[in-house]
């Protein structure tokens, strides 16, 4: 007798691709495998569906760090396909990531914690390296800086650290706000000039050693986990190549359907 087993991930996370492919590998005796939990208890705990009226009048499935809205969508074309959760919200995960991108920008414009450098063209809070751990008194304000950690909006943590890679990897979602931000980093901050491998991992304009230093602290490193998504998402913006190739994968298609996705290209 076929089994109907529901095993759910505990949060909306970068594990989406793994879960989808795991669905595809379930044996025929299991009719229903893994997907995201949407229970009211868990949603109330993680605030996964929220209206952020202070920053933007959109509803979205919430996670604060921008990389979660990007990494699974490097590979999966979520445009127009919906699971049960998104059908109920008349949304899809691509649109959800677009909204998350706009929320990041709006948060930087509002700049509720008063960090230096935040603006319409300087945003991007995600999991990244920072100038800490350290606590400094800057302009009469005690600032706590973190090392590596998942920074996010609007609930934090936020120590003034910006990841340019988080901006670039949002290109397919909202080119109209991403391209001006890229231009700002290249033309205004001159952030590309001394970096032969592209943008450094992070900057923190608040943690500056010189008053006129617009970038402030700059990460001395380049990480492949930052560089890779930029390259791949630029190509998805240009041609949709990765999405097109992955749509032809029978394993991906089977995994999405077993997770309850339908519509669009499926």
Image (spheres, rainbow, N blue to C red):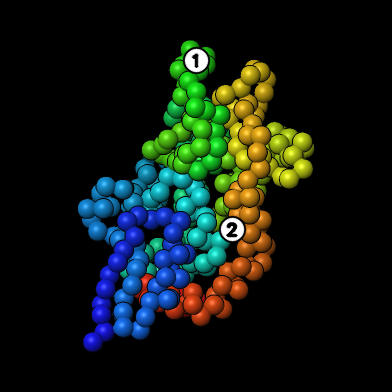
In the orientation shown, which residue stands out farthest toward the bottom? 1
Q: Please name the residue shown 49% across and 77% down the image.
A: 251
71 left or right of 245 in image: left
Residue name at image x 54 percent, y 33 percent: 130
Left or right, 88 with respect to 76, comes to left
| Residue 146 x/y as whole percent | 48, 30
Q: Residues within 10 Å of mark 2 (few under 14, many from 20)?
A: many
Checking the image for residue 137, the label placed there is 1
- Would residue 182 be found to the left or right of residue 57 on screen? right
User: Can residue 25 be seen from the camera position used here?
Assistant: yes
Residue found at x 52% / y 55%: 70
Q: Closer to the camera, 30 or 140?
A: 30
- Which one is closest to the eye, mark 1 or mark 2? 1
Nearer to us in this view, 176 or 199: 199
Is any part of residue 103 visible from this angle? Answer: no
Kindly report the distance in space between the C-alpha atoms of the residues bearing marks 1 and 2. 39 Å
Residue 217 x, y percent position in the rendering: 62, 28
Residue 122 picture quarter = top right
Horizontal arrangement in the rendering, residue 245 relative to residue 144 (left or right): right
Foreground of the two, 240 or 2 = 2
Q: Position of residue 93 (x, y in %)?
A: 44, 61
Q: Quadrant of residue 258?
A: bottom left
Instruction: State whether residue 218 is above or below residue 197.
Output: above
Above or below — where is 116 with respect to 242? Answer: above
**Badge 1 density bin: few <14, some 14–19, many ≥20, Cα 10 Å:** few
How many marks overall?
Answer: 2
Q: Is disc 2 placed on a helix, strand or loop? A: loop
Question: For the residue labelled by badge 1, is the local secondary structure a helix, a strand or a loop?
Answer: strand
Which residue corresponds to mark 2?
172
């Amino acid at each position: 007798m076929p089994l109907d087993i529901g095993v759910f991930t505990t949060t909306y996370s970068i594990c989406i691709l793994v879960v989808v492919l795991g669905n595809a590998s379930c044996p025929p005796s299991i009719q229903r495998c893994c997907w995201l939990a949407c229970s009211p208890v868990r949603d109330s705990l993680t605030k996964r569906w929220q209206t952020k009226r202070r920053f933007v009048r959109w509803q979205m499935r919430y996670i604060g760090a921008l990389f979660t809205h990007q990494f699974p969508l490097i590979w999966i074309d979520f445009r127009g396909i919906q699971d049960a959760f998104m059908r109920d919200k008349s949304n899809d995960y691509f649109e959800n990531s677009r909204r998350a991108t706009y929320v990041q920008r709006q948060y930087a414009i509002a700049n509720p914690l008063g960090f230096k450098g935040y603006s319409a063209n300087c945003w991007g809070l995600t999991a990244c390296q920072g100038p800490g751990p350290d606590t400094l008194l800057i302009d009469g304000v005690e600032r706590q800086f973190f090392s590596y950690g998942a920074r996010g909006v609007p609930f934090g943590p936020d120590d003034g650290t910006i990841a340019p890679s988080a901006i670039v990897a949002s290109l397919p979602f909202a080119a109209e706000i991403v391209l001006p931000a890229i231009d700002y980093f290249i033309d205004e901050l001159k952030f590309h000039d001394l970096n032969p491998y592209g943008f450094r991992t992070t900057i923190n304009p608040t943690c500056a050693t010189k008053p006129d230093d617009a970038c402030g602290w700059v990460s001395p490193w380049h990480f492949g986990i930052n560089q890779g998504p930029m390259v791949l998402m630029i190509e998805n913006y240009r041609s949709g190549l990765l999405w097109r190739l992955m749509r032809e994968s029978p394993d991906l298609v089977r995994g999405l359907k077993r997770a309850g996705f339908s519509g669009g290209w499926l």
